Image (spheres, rainbow, N blue to C red):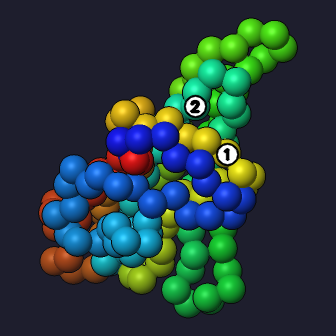
Amino acid sequence: MTQYLAIRSGQIVVFDQVLANYGKSYRQSVGVFVTPYNGLYQFHMHIHTRKSFIAEVTLRVKRKMNTQSMQDIVRTWADGKTGNIEYEMGSSNSAIVYLEKGDMVYCVLPKNQVLSGLQFTSFSGYLMKTDEKNDMNSKDRFQTFLP
């Protein structure tokens, strides 16, 4: 993310700067990574919030097989205001998860919040191991930064 971004509750975080998207699996226009293969994936997210703000981001999976099925994988939370002390704060989390081809992975905010930009907030992931023959492809990596 290259700039501060105010995001509404339940809104998917759309990253405005993509550093690498070799497998073209990250759909930048909607902020969603669509898995190209069945396999084991690793995702990382880092958030940063300004003084006097609180930010929480959830890494969510929407399963292709059941369009109504969403699963929150991990969350990260940064508190820029504790008591009378105000400061900028960052937080990170990672997950390794088995996904099927066509599953969607994205970051979502559970409440109205402000995320910091300037490359302090990021989302990245990659395919670690496929369970399909000859489908392992090191090009299926992406890394993003929030605006």
Residue 90 in the image: above or below residue 13: above
Can you see residue 87?
yes
Is the residue marked by circle 1 packed among few (<14), some (14-19), or many (20+) residues within 10 Å?
some
Left or right: residue 19 versus residue 51 is left
**Residue at (84, 14) in percent of width and height:** 83
In terms of image quadrants, where is residue 3? top left
The type of residue carrying mark 2 is: Thr
Whether residue 17 sits left or right of residue 95 in the image: it is left
The residue lying toward the viewer, choosing from 143 and 103, is 143
Residue receiving disc 2: 49
Residue 133 in percent (x, y) is at 21, 80
From the top left corner, tell me how far across and down residue 63 is, in percent. Answer: 56, 80
The N terminus appears in which quarter of the rendering?
top left
Q: Residues within 10 Å of mark 2 (few under 14, many from 20)?
A: many
Q: Write the residue at 35% across / 36% down.
A: 119
- Give the vertical position of 38 relative to 105 (above or below): below
Look at the numbered disc 2 and give the secondary structure of its residue.
Answer: strand
Q: Is residue 144 above or below residue 51?
A: below
- Mark 1–mark 2 contact, CB under 8 Å? yes
SS at badge 1: strand
Q: Residue furthest top?
A: 85
Give the CA distance from mark 1 to mark 2: 9 Å
What residue would you read off at disc 1?
Answer: 113
Tell me: residue 25, above or below residue 97: below
Residue at 56 percent across and 64 percent down: it is 12
Q: Position of residue 103 (x, y in %)?
A: 47, 78
Marked residue nearer the N-terminal end (1 or 2): 2
Dot label at residue 76: none
